[in-house]
Amino acid sequence: MARNSYSIGILLIGLAALLLLGKLGFFHVLLSFFWPLVLLIPGLLFHVFFFNRSLPAGVLVPGGILTTYALMFFYCNIFGWGSMSYLWPGFILGVAIGLYEMHLFDRGSDRGVLIGAMVLGIISTVCFGLTLLIHLGIYVIALILVVAGLVMIFRKRNVW
């Protein structure tokens, strides 16, 4: 009986510690940063199950999508959600990655899967480029003007 009350006492102290940590906001901070694991873990499990030959190649599509999205969300958690204004083409890229993985690892995949992956990849790349040009365009133009000015100042003049 003494051994049983000892175990229950330890359990009660552990429960109290969990309640206090929750009240202090420890779990809120932890979950607010690591919530993309809810997407990353299933995405990685799809890959593990495929490579262990437990599931067919079709699971690589949602695996690639979930993994890509989770990495984007971790990036936003670290650098701020304003970065989603130029990361949004990653949603298209996630589908392209999933389709390309399925084409790459499934010997019997249709050629249309590769074409779909390439089309979505190109669309995503063009959207990334346009978004970065819009967000960083003024800096690129300023850099080009500075370089052109430096070239004009320091170039050797032709003496006749």
Image (cartoon, helix red, strand yellow):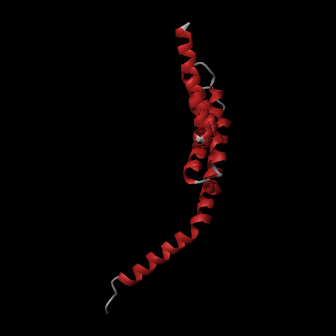
The spot of residue 66 in percent (x, y) is 63, 37
Of residues 33 and 92, the one nearer the viewer is 33
For this orientation, the residue located farthest to the bottom is 160
Image quadrant occupied by the C terminus: bottom left
Residue 65, image x, y percentages: 64, 38
Residue 18 versus residue 94: which sits nearer the camera? Answer: 18
Residue 74, above or below 154: above
Which residue occupies the extreme left position in the image?
159
Is 91 above or below relative to 9?
below
Nearer to us in this view, 94 or 3 = 3
- Whether residue 119 is visible, yes or no, is no
Residue pictured at 66% horizontal, 36% vertical:
113
Q: Is residue 91 above or below residue 82?
A: above
How far from the left and from the top, in percent, is residue 150? 40, 79
- Quadrant, the N terminus: top right
Identify the residue at image location x=66%, y=46%: 91
Residue 90 seen anywhere in this rendered image of the structure: yes
- Please tell me whether residue 69 is drawn above or below residue 134 in the rendered image: above
Q: Residue lying furthest front in this view?
A: 2
Q: Nearer the viewer, residue 121 or 30?
A: 30
Residue 21: name its quadrant.
Answer: top right
Res 147 quadrant in image: bottom left
